Amino acid sequence: MLKSSTCIKAALLATMASTASAEGELNLYSSRHYDTDERLYSDFEESTGITINRIEGKADELIARMQAEGANSPADVLLTVDTSRLKRAKDAGVLQPIDSAELEARVPGYLQDADNQWFGFSQRSRIIFYDKADVTAPPMTYADLADPKHKGLICIRSSSNTYNQTLLASIITHTDEETAKAWAQGVVDNMARAPQGGDTDQLRGIVSGECDIAVANTYYFARSIRKDVDGLSAERDMIGWVFPSQNAEGAHMNLSGGGVAAHAPNRENAVKFLEYLASDQAQEYFSAGNDEYPAVPGVGLSPAIAALGFFKPDDIDLSEVAENIPAAQRIFNEVNWN
């Protein structure tokens, strides 16, 4: 994320607004906070001659900013993480439909918005991790996480976490709200501690002995294979993992994706940038640079991701899942999942 002060950001935004229509520019609003994305941006600039001007921040703040800026917004592209945030952007009216045969052809239909207002460009799978010494029969499905035999064993993030919201929304989509509520209540009953921290902290909970089972996205664990992660990498061998529901719908996937801003002054460049993100070069870098799964089929995986093994992903239409996110948040509240 940018390290500049609020004043510097405001000055940059003003500069972007005054030059937004100039040729050869792209104004990117991004909530992706990964230093490795620098390579994505520099490669695009070098290959196209288009200069990327960036504003980085939290997704909800960027969406609110785009709403406030209205038709005067300099934003060309919004890039963010998780289906829930892409839905918020669409519902807020800050995106527009994208007409691109290349995106349609390269990005699978279930990773696209039904109205083509956003496309997914990288994926993470939300899977089950466990202490190999203490757990001889780990949960093999998401439903198993609610089994009373796992009472007091599970570490998982809070209900405000977008990854959990999308996971529960996918359960609603596959089943119904009653089944999803029973599952959420079962997980709450099985928690080893009150939800706290990020996904890496859930994995560290296994290492520290606070829990025997954790739910986290794959790229947090893969990162500990590729480089040293404090409190995790040294003890990584004690942790096993399960890609859930392999005999049913498959392992849940969530997205990093983006769309063209509703009032994009450099719309053509915006579409070019999104098409670049779907190219083999960019797709390979999503995997190599940030331990994510490519959205485009057939693109090679980084060694750290490949080490997790092959699995069946859930290919449910994420546009449908997005529609159930409000219901998921309501259920979380009803079962007191903090």
Image (cartoon, rainbow, N blue to C red):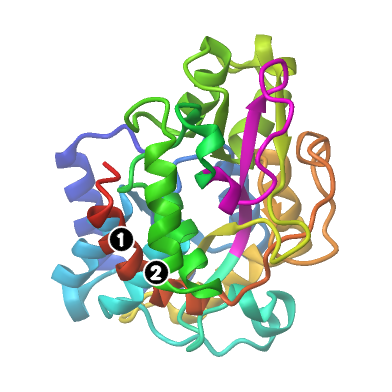
Q: Which residues are magenta?
A: 121-145
Q: Residues within 10 Å of mark 2 (few under 14, many from 20)?
A: few
Outermost residue, front direction? 148
Left of 116 or right of it: where is 219?
right
Residue identifier under label 2: 178
Residue 196: image x %, image y %?
A: 34, 29
**Residue in the picture at 81% in, 47% down:** 301
In the image, what residue type sits under mark 2? Glu
Q: Position of residue 52 (x, y in %)?
A: 46, 57
Q: Toward the viewer: 261 or 217?
A: 217
The answer to whether one can see residue 119 in this image is yes
Q: Nearer the viewer, residue 265 or 128?
A: 128
| The C terminus, quarter of image | top left
Q: Looking at the picture, which amino acid does disc 1 mark? A: Ile
On screen, residue 213 above or below 208: below
The answer to if 142 sits in the magenta stretch is yes
Q: x, y percentage for residue 321?
A: 48, 72
Front: mark 1 or 2: 2
Residue at numbered disc 1: 331
Which type of secondary structure does the marked residue at label 1 adopt? Answer: helix
| Residue 139 is one of the magenta-drawn residues | yes
At horizontal 52% and vertical 63% (from top left) the residue drawn is 257
Which numbered disc covers residue 36?
A: none
Which badge, 1 or 2, is on the more N-terminal residue?
A: 2
3D distance between C-alphas at marks 1 and 2 = 9 Å
Rendered position, 169 above or below 223: below
Residue ID at (46%, 25%): 201
Label 2: element kind: helix
